[in-house]
Image (cartoon, grey):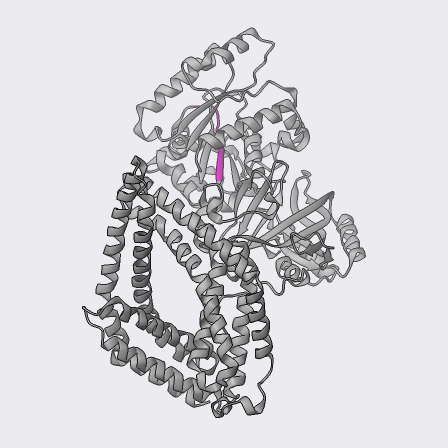
């Protein structure tokens, strides 16, 4: 089972849209896929028309009092399931802090899903916390959507340094990719063209598109209503690269 | 189709329409047209079907998807293929790397995947929605049809179905829908297996039809020659069913099963000589011996080529690549032998043999050419020849010590096969529980003798090939040196099997095993 986390310290970089579209593509490619909406805002749950509510809240899930499997909902798409967000997820950090080996907690939980799924995609909340450390330990790859600006690149660098510090974080491959790229902006063009210097970015570039924003209106992944579109194609290329880079 | 959900049978197309309409009146639904196409695969001997698993391809926007529904409750494995491959999957080992390939290779072994049934289902996907317009149950209303793959013949309609597929996390909605279909609409739930239905209608015979295993129903009091003809007819059928696959060389098991059936036939005839008039049976024995002869070299090469990777793995890594010229030589021999074999099996001599043998087996010979032994009850004959074959092994085996030449072990191996075949021919005359222990004891011994023989044959082939590889240039030298390493490996293995023999034989000849044989024959005496 592969665990892929959409992660960035910053918010509003296209994490949820990317998580939804990549999860859709994974399932379409024949992999039994679970998307776990870890963001208390519940945007990914909303996109799939699923109520952002987990019975008993996130604390019980993390403690293992309630089996993950019971909280999972099927989506409108075959082979794609979703573990909804819950508003209580905002306090998961506090809950983790009271548990033994908090950083390993998530990895242990995900193991129970091993027979059910080929891919687990984590849509993480924007922060750097005990929960995100738990994500670093559990993941095979951190997919980092990055808007091509100088500040974003700086954050990416910091993330890299942070991950290098701990041995248990080094298992996850860090795969940044450019997201919400507006080719009318000179800075975006420059950064996308020359970024190879410090970090290795995936080649596929997700353009800024109102269709991606429209996902929240259609409440569906991009391919369900605009499979022909430029951003949909870009996500396909991105997924193909991820498939090649992260062995299952 | 149980893997897709709970299936309800609709009598005909218009009833299916009524079901969809009723769902629309009762629930909030959305509909879309669907066309489901599947090409089911299995090996010639139905290895997947026997494990209650299904393998199929279905077309996808880009290429196709291979799906393996394993035996419940194990889950499905899937794999994206570049194209549908038009029914050509080949061997599991040729699939893209991954879990599906590894697991499937273990189940299929050396057998090739062949398309068995093509299914096409037009219909509608009815999505039952909740207040958020989210799908909470899927109902597939479809009209499946099947045909044999390859020849684009007409489609045969299978029963129309409504398949309810639950969506995870919405059990209540699913209960509501099944309650509605089963309760209010009074539809009958049923297990629908389109592979099974399709294979019968597609003219393939029942799914799981072919097996290399022999099992002939016998009446213990039947005349010996009648019962034997039933056994021989079954063997002839195996020969004929493997003919096309042997000629096309789809995989190595066709030739293997073909040869085993020929050898069983010859063995049956040689052990029941008194049952037949000699002048009737002599030409068949001669021709069957020819058939055994022309299929032998190819099989020896197959065994070698199949075992070679295992031998290579035992050698140091740098030497492995140097075995490549030898492997290619074996393969080119194989091609030549296969051409000879295919032309013999396509030729008149083979055709005459099969046709005359079939008509011989079809009816009892005239009374005047039936020796008295032909009229004894089969159970008595079986008892006598099984006892005899068993005693012969004990006698031959006891005469073997550490210095006995290989030929004696070879003869013992043949004796073992003869006994094994008898136990298989007459399986129906004995209680299964009584057959188990003697067969297992015999198998232990035969595995040892078989491996010993294979290594000997392969060493001799190695010697005869070595000269041809020594052409004098540098790769030739490396190749010959690799052969030296291989020969040493084979000799080591041969010696190991030889050393094991006395222990294995002691196991077979000890009182307890003989007791099993006595018990078996005693069980055959009492009906």
Image quadrant assignment for residue B210: bottom right
Q: Position of residue A229 (x, y in %)?
A: 66, 25
Image quadrant assignment for residue B444: bottom left
As rendered, which of A158 and B286 lies closer to the eye? Answer: B286
Left or right: residue A179 versus residue B1 is left
Q: Establish if B487 lies above or below B391.
A: above
Q: Is residue B451 magenta?
A: no
The answer to whether one can see residue B209 in this image is no
The answer to whether one can see residue A210 in this image is yes
Left or right: residue A121 versus residue B304 is right
Q: Where is residue B366 in the image (x, y as percent from the top left)?
A: 59, 88
Left or right: residue B306 versus residue B277 is left
As rendered, which of B271 and A21 lies closer to the eye? Answer: B271
Q: Which residue is drawn at 58% across and 67% down?
A: B351
Q: How many marks?
A: 0
Q: Position of residue B509 (x, y in %)?
A: 26, 77
Considering every residue shown, the one lying at the far top of the view is: A186
Q: Residue at x 30, y 81 (%)?
A: B514
Left or right: residue B6 versus residue A172 is right
What residue range appears in magenta?
A119-127
Q: Where is residue A194 in the image (x, y as percent from the top left)?
A: 47, 11
Q: Establish if A65 lies above or below A202.
A: below
As rendered, which of A99 and B429 lies closer to the eye? Answer: B429
As rendered, which of A153 and B362 lies closer to the eye? Answer: B362
Image quadrant assignment for residue B408: bottom left
Q: Establish if A165 lies above or below A244.
A: above
């Amino acid at each position: 089972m592969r665990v892929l986390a959409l992660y960035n310290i910053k918010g509003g970089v296209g994490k949820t849209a990317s998580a939804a579209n990549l999860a859709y593509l994974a399932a379409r490619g024949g992999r039994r896929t679970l998307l776990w909406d870890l963001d208390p805002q519940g945007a990914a749950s909303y996109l799939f028309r699923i109520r952002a509510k987990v019975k008993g809240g996130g604390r019980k899930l993390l403690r293992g009092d309630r089996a993950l499997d019971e909280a999972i909902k099927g989506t409108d798409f075959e082979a794609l399931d979703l573990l909804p967000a819950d508003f209580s997820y905002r306090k998961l950090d506090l809950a983790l802090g009271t548990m033994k080996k908090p950083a390993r907690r998530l990895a242990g939980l995900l193991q129970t899903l091993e027979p059910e799924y080929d891919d687990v995609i984590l849509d993480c909340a924007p922060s750097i916390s005990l929960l995100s450390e738990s994500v670093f330990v559990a993941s095979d790859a951190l997919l980092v959507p990055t808007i091509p600006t100088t500040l974003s690149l700086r954050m990416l660098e910091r993330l890299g340094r942070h991950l290098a510090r701990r041995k248990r974080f080094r298992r996850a491959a860090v795969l940044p990719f450019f997201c919400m790229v507006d080719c009318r902006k000179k800075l975006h063009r420059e950064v996308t063209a020359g970024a190879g210097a410090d970090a290795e970015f995936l080649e596929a570039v997700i353009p800024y598109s109102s269709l991606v924003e429209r996902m929240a209106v259609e409440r569906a992944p991009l391919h369900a209503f605009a499979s022909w579109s430029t951003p949909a194609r870009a996500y396909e290329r991105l997924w193909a690269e991820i498939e090649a880079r992260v062995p299952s | 189709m149980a893997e897709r959900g709970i299936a309800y049978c609709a009598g005909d197309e218009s009833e299916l329409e009524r079901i969809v309409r009723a769902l629309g009146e009762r629930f909030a639904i959305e509909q879309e047209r669907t066309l489901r196409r599947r090409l089911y695969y299995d090996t010639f001997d139905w290895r997947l079907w026997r494990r209650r698993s299904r393998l199929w391809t279905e077309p996808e926007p880009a290429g196709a998807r291979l799906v393996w529904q394993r035996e419940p409750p194990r889950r499905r494995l899937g794999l994206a293929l570049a194209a549908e491959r038009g029914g050509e999957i080949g061997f599991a080992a040729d699939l893209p790397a991954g879990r599906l390939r590894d697991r499937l290779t273990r189940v299929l072994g050396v057998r090739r995947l062949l398309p068995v049934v093509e299914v096409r289902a037009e219909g509608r996907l009815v999505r039952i929605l909740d207040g958020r317009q989210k799908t909470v149950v899927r109902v597939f209303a479809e009209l499946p049809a099947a045909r044999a793959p390859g020849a684009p013949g007409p489609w045969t309609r299978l029963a129309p179905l409504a398949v309810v597929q639950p969506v995870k996390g919405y059990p209540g909605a699913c209960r509501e829908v099944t309650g509605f279909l089963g309760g209010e609409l009074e539809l009958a739930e049923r297990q629908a297996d389109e592979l099974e239905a399709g294979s019968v209608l597609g003219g393939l015979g029942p799914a799981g039809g072919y097996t290399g295993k022999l099992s002939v129903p016998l009446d213990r009091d039947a005349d010996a020659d009648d019962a034997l003809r039933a056994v021989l007819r079954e063997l002839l059928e195996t020969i004929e069913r493997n003919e096309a696959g042997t000629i096309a060389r789809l995989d190595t098991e066709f030739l293997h099963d073909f040869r085993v059936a020929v050898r069983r036939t010859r063995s049956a005839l040689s052990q029941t000589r008194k049952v037949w008039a000699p002048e009737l049976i002599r030409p068949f024995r001669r021709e069957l011996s020819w058939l055994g002869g022309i299929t032998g070299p190819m099989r020896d090469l197959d065994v070698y080529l199949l075992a070679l990777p295992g031998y290579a793995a035992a050698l140091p890594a740098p030497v492995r690549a140097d075995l490549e010229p030898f492997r290619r030589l074996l393969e080119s021999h194989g091609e030549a032998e296969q051409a000879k074999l295919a032309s013999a099996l396509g030729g008149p001599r083979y055709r005459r043999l099969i046709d005359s043998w079939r008509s011989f087996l079809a009816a009892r010979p005239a009374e005047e050419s039936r020796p008295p032994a032909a009229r004894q009850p089969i159970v008595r004959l079986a008892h006598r020849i099984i006892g005899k074959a068993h005693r012969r092994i004990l006698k031959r085996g006891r005469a073997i010590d550490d210095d006995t030449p290989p030929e004696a072990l070879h003869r013992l191996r043949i004796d073992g096969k003869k006994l094994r075949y008898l136990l298989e021919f007459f399986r129906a005359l004995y209680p299964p529980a009584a057959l188990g222990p003697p067969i297992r004891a015999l198998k232990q011994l035969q595995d040892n003798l078989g491996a010993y023989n294979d290594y000997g044959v392969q060493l001799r082939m190695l010697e005869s090939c070595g000269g041809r590889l020594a052409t004098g240039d540098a790769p030739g030298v490396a190749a010959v040196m690799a052969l030296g390493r291989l020969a040493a490996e084979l000799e080591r293995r041969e010696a190991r099997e030889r050393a094991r023999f006395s222990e294995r034989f002691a196991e077979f000849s000890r009182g307890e095993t003989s007791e099993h044989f006595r018990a078996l024959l005693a069980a055959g005496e009492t009906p």
